[in-house]
Amino acid sequence: MAITSANQLELLQTAEAVAREKMIDPGLVVEAMEESLSRAAKSRYGAEMDIRVSIDRKTGRATFTRVRTVVADDEVENYQAEFTVEQAKQYMADPEIGQEFIEEVPPVEMGRIAAQSAKQVILQKVREAERDRQYEEFKDRAGTIINGLVKREEYGNVIVDVGRGEAILRRNEKIGREAYRPNDRIRCYIKDVRREQRGPQIFLSRTAPEFMAELFKMEVPEIYDGIIEIKAVARDPGSRAKIAVISYDSSIDPVGACVGMRGSRVQAVVNELQGEKIDIIPWNDDQPTFLVNALQPAEVTKVVLDEEAGKIDVVVPEEQLSLAIGRRGQNVRLASQLTGLDIDIMTEAEDSERRQKEFEERTGLFMENLDLDEFFAQLLVSEGFTNLEEVAYVDLDELMVIDGIDDDTAKELQARARDILEAKAKAALDKAREMGVEDSLIEFEGLTPQMVLALAEDGVKTLEDFATCADWELAGGWTVQDGERIKDDGLLEPFDVSLEEAQNMVMTARVMLGWVDPTEMAGATDDGEAEEEAEA
């Protein structure tokens, strides 16, 4: 094919036709043509030459030029595309390094192989432009619902035609054992849009909790308008789900609005989710109250919340235990996902047995260490004393309110408790020193001898060692792996050291060692909190 006046306009017409069909910029197609013609010219004139082609966007005329660059004498590598200042003087008046000499060369005729190569270049460029267009179109639609047509199924993954592109619904993102045939209509949640080597990948999901939330937004006008907010969703796809809602208008019942007249609104969502049963629960900022709601339909007798550990104990009547746990633990698992808490369910009998065991352990502690008879030790436990520190350092008045304890007895109890604690502290300190713990760590404010010993047993023996610890390594914490909360035990967790206290101690140690500027301490602490939130 020769580039003649007869087919100059044909180039532009072809570019526009391709651009219109693929819905991309015609300029990109023309650029691809220029590159393909340049390759054909190089195969004709020589691959070493720098041949460039420019197509006039109005007339379609293709101009072929050869470019040579002026370089230093010792830098000439390609004699066909580069020349020295001396050589350039034949063609240029006053050549300088870096200048380019451009001369027009005769257009080439494309042979069959060159034409095929040119076609491949154009197709490749068009595909890349098409992928960019698809990515730009769908990247902002992540987090929304899309309707599509099933094209085919590959190894359990469903390829979906979503209009101007293809999306993939992976096997693990389908509900239960859903099966689709070509041309079936399908509704999915756009979970992610990523730009990859083979083009933009649009990942769909029907199991994501957000899919249910978006379906409710479509069915319930009050959610769409912001009068009702979906606070949390937990799903066991295809089986059961719980959704927590709150109304910002006191005249509108959030649960009733989501259920709809005769259940019409929730039934529309259930039908889309293959019959998934949905519990709609009123949200409450008070976690124990919200948990009681989340465990419906089971009735709860008592809730004990440990906020620091993110754990909650729930006591239910014996006959309600199986209902609270649910089939294969489904009910309690969904309630745990909804509240973000670890839930431990026990019967009233188990709760009574646990409290009795704690009572006996504390009674034994006071009997053994304070040399008290069982009755006297039980009096202390009944009044809420749980350890020797509380007895040793509490106000005398709090001991004297117990029947049978006068001023002298209270003082004697405190003296015994302090003696025991001092003896234990000395023993811990002696053992820590034997293990090689340095005085810089022993004398660090906030660490008791027992804490120092616990650190030493884990290899933390110097202030430098301590300063390299992360706050969660000391106080413990929770991490989420594959959707499950996993407990990380802290070295100082048995001593009730909070995450904030651990953070402050570590930062103080770093300041003492000169690792951190004291003026930056507040900022660094804030960063630590941000990191902790990100990990959570």
Image: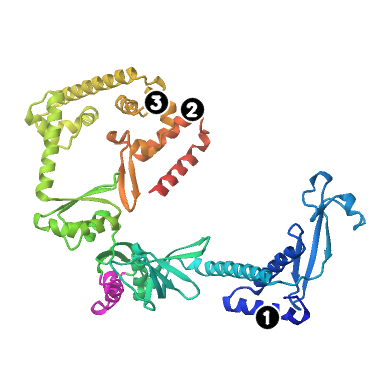
Q: Which residues are magenta?
A: 250-275
Closest to the camera, between mark 2 and mark 1, is 1
Pointer 3: what residue?
Answer: 444
Residues at discs 1 and 3 in contact (Cβ within 8 Å): no
Label 3's element?
loop
Q: Amino acid at mark 3?
A: Phe
Q: Residues within 10 Å of mark 2 (few under 14, many from 20)?
A: few
> Which of disc 3 and disc 1 is earlier in sequence?
1
Q: Where is residue 346 shown, x and y percent of the image? A: 15, 50
> Which of disc 1 and disc 2 is earlier in sequence?
1
**Secondary structure of the magenta portion, mostly?**
helix
* Residue 330 on the magenta segment: no
The span from disc 1 to disc 3 (Cα, nearest Å) is 81 Å
The span from disc 2 to disc 1 (Cα, nearest Å) is 73 Å
Closest to the camera, between mark 1 and mark 3, is 1
Q: Residue at x 33, y 39 (%)?
A: 476
Q: Amino acid at mark 2?
A: Leu
Residue 105 figure quarter: bottom right
Residues at discs 2 and 1 in contact (Cβ within 8 Å): no
Pointer 2: what residue?
Answer: 513
Pointer 1: what residue?
Answer: 13
> Which of disc 2 and disc 3 is earlier in sequence?
3
Closest to the observer: 162 or 433? 162
